[in-house]
Image: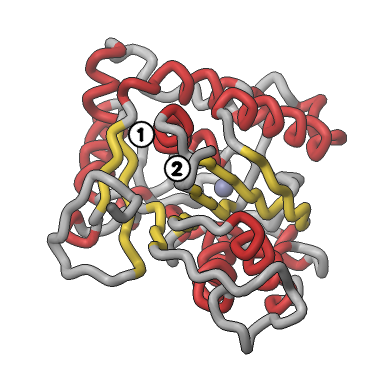
């Protein structure tokens, strides 16, 4: 029985694969008990070309994709089943059941419960920008950060068992803006406008990313490349992670992309601090 445990709280069915899927695959291979909680049902997600028929049964499709992807990653899946909110200004954000509009105390309690049950040393969630300012990503940060501390506090959520448990480290997924700058150059070379990306042209790539000295942890997963790609491919209705880099040789893609980057939120570390491992020794 392994004694290293990790819990990631992420917004959508696909964030576990398109996001730090390589990191999860690596830790599973190293014997870590990896748990992933997905907050929403993915109903407001966009649909890849050719999958328009999937729209009316999007929740069922995305649940199936998520189940398949997490099986490939080898992680234990937990679903909060909140209704997906949309991107900024999406009408889906006005739905009373949308994740961002639901009772915050209750949502924090769900994370507290998982932490007390799983007893992870390491907790991961989105950062306060949500990567690209998606409200559901930001909401995960909003609930998981207080839950990380509440889980160890016997005064908070006393009704939630089994017993208070304080994880040791909290990480936020984030990527350096150096990477984004590289990517915006690629977009411009292809004649595309980096300030109007995404299906609705409402994602401004020039505003994305974190200064590199605020990125603390870099997890290399190039040995688990195939697992990450296979898991991402399960999310066919979301484009399957078939990236813009198809024309690039795999060795170069691995060198450029087979690394996940994280901000260490707790315990805090100074700017410029660097580590290549999430678990304390
Ligand atoms: Zn997402």
Along the viewing direction, whichever of 171 and 94 lies nearer the viewer: 171
Can you identify the residue that label 2 sits on? Answer: 197
In-image side of 89 versus 232 (left or right) = right
SS of the residue under disc 2: loop
- The answer to which of marks 1 and 2 sits earlier in the sequence is 1
**Residue extending farthest right:** 56
Q: Position of residue 173 (x, y in %)?
A: 40, 52
**Quarter of the image that includes the N terminus:** top right
**Quadrant in the picture for residue 264:** bottom left
Q: Position of residue 22 (x, y in %)?
A: 42, 32
Q: Nearer the viewer, residue 232 or 96?
A: 232
Mark 1 burial class by Cα count in 10 Å: few <14, some 14-19, many 20+: few
Up-down relation of residue 206 to residue 21 (above or below):
below
Q: Position of residue 108 (x, y in %)?
A: 65, 72
Q: Is residue 48 visible?
A: no
Asked if the residue at tag 2 contacts the one at tag 1, i.e. Cβ–Cβ closer than 8 Å, the answer is yes
How far across and down, in percent of the image, does residue 213 sit?
16, 59
Q: Residues within 10 Å of mark 2 (few under 14, many from 20)?
A: some
Which residue is identified by label 1? 192
Q: Which circle, 1 or 2, is nearer the viewer?
A: 2
Residue 270 located left or right of residue 72: left
Q: Is residue 78 above or below residue 157?
A: above
Q: Is residue 109 left or right of residue 219?
A: right
Query: What residue appears at the point 30 percent right and 30 percent down from the top-left corner?
Result: 257
User: Please, which residue is most extreme toward the front here?
Assistant: 1
Q: CA distance from mark 1 to mark 2?
A: 8 Å
94 left or right of 257? right
Name the residue located 35 percent from the left edge and 67 percent from the top edge: 265
Residue 235 position (above or below residue 266): above
């Amino acid at each position: 029985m392994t004694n290293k445990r990790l819990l990631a709280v992420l917004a959508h069915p696909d964030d576990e694969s398109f996001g730090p899927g390589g990191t999860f695959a690596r830790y599973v291979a190293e014997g870590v008990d990896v748990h992933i909680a997905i907050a929403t049902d993915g109903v407001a997600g966009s649909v890849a070309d050719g999958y328009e028929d999937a729209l009316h049964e999007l929740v069922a499709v995305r649940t199936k994709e998520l189940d398949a992807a997490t099986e490939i990653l080898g992680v234990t899946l937990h679903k909060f089943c909140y209704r997906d909110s949309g991107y900024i200004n999406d009408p889906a954000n006005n739905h009373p059941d949308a994740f961002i509009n639901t009772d915050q105390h209750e949502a924090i309690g769900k994370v507290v419960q998982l932490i007390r049950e799983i007893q992870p040393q390491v907790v991961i969630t989105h950062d306060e920008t949500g990567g690209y300012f998606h409200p559901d990503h930001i909401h995960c940060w909003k609930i998981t950060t207080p839950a990380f501390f509440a889980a160890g506090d016997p005064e908070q959520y006393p009704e939630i068992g089994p017993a208070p448990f304080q994880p040791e480290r909290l990480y936020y997924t984030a990527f350096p803006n150096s990477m984004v700058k590289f990517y915006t150059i690629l977009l411009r070379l292809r004649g595309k406008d980096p300030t109007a990306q995404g299906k609705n042209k409402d994602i401004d790539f020039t505003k994305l990313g974190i200064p590199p000295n605020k990125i603390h942890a870099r997890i290399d997963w190039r040995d688990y490349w195939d697992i990450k790609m296979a898991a991402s491919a399960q999310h066919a209705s979301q484009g399957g992670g078939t990236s813009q880099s198809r024309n690039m040789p795999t060795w170069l893609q691995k060198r450029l992309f087979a690394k996940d980057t994280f901000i260490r939120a707790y315990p805090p570390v100074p700017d410029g601090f660097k580590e290549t491992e999430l678990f304390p020794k």
